[in-house]
Image (cartoon, helix red, strand yellow):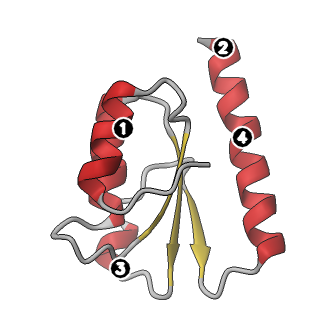
Amino acid sequence: VIAISSPREALELAATSEKFQILLTDLQLGDRMSGLDLAHELCIQRPGLVVAITTGYLAPEDAKRITPGWVILEKPVTSDKLVSAISALARQNRAAQASA
């Protein structure tokens, strides 16, 4: 797990690190880039990237921008729910790598 403080830092890390396999982000980042924008940008850099987005509210226009296979976690996110989602995403990531 690598904690990132900004979307720019996440984009830079994804461009230089092979360890970047799963993205867990909030929908609202407050840095002129939403979690959806970040996820779309990272998926361009890393096709097949596994994505989970947390949110307290998903507006209809945002829901239309979600790529199939992404996981949306509604807040509040319990630790059990988070562990379950990340485990499922890790399995999805391993399956995608095995078929590539």
Task: Indicate which disc, 1 or 2, sits on the residue closer to the N terminus.
Answer: 1
Foreground label between 1 and 4: 1
Q: Report the disc number at residue 90.
A: 4
Q: Amino acid at mark 2?
A: Ser
Label 1, on which residue?
13
Q: Position of residue 70 (x, y in %)?
A: 54, 53
Marks 2 and 3: CB-CB under 8 Å?
A: no
Task: Indicate which disc, 2 or 4, sits on the residue closer to the N terminus.
Answer: 4
Q: CA distance from mark 2 to mark 3?
A: 33 Å
Image point 29% across, 57% down: which residue? 7
Label 3, on which residue?
60
Q: CA distance from mark 2 to mark 4?
A: 14 Å
Image point 50% across, 87% down: which residue? 56
Foreground label between 1 and 2: 1
Q: CA distance from mark 1 to mark 4?
A: 19 Å
| Mark 4 crowd level (few <14, some 14–19, many ≥20, 10 Å Cα) | some
Label 2, on which residue?
99
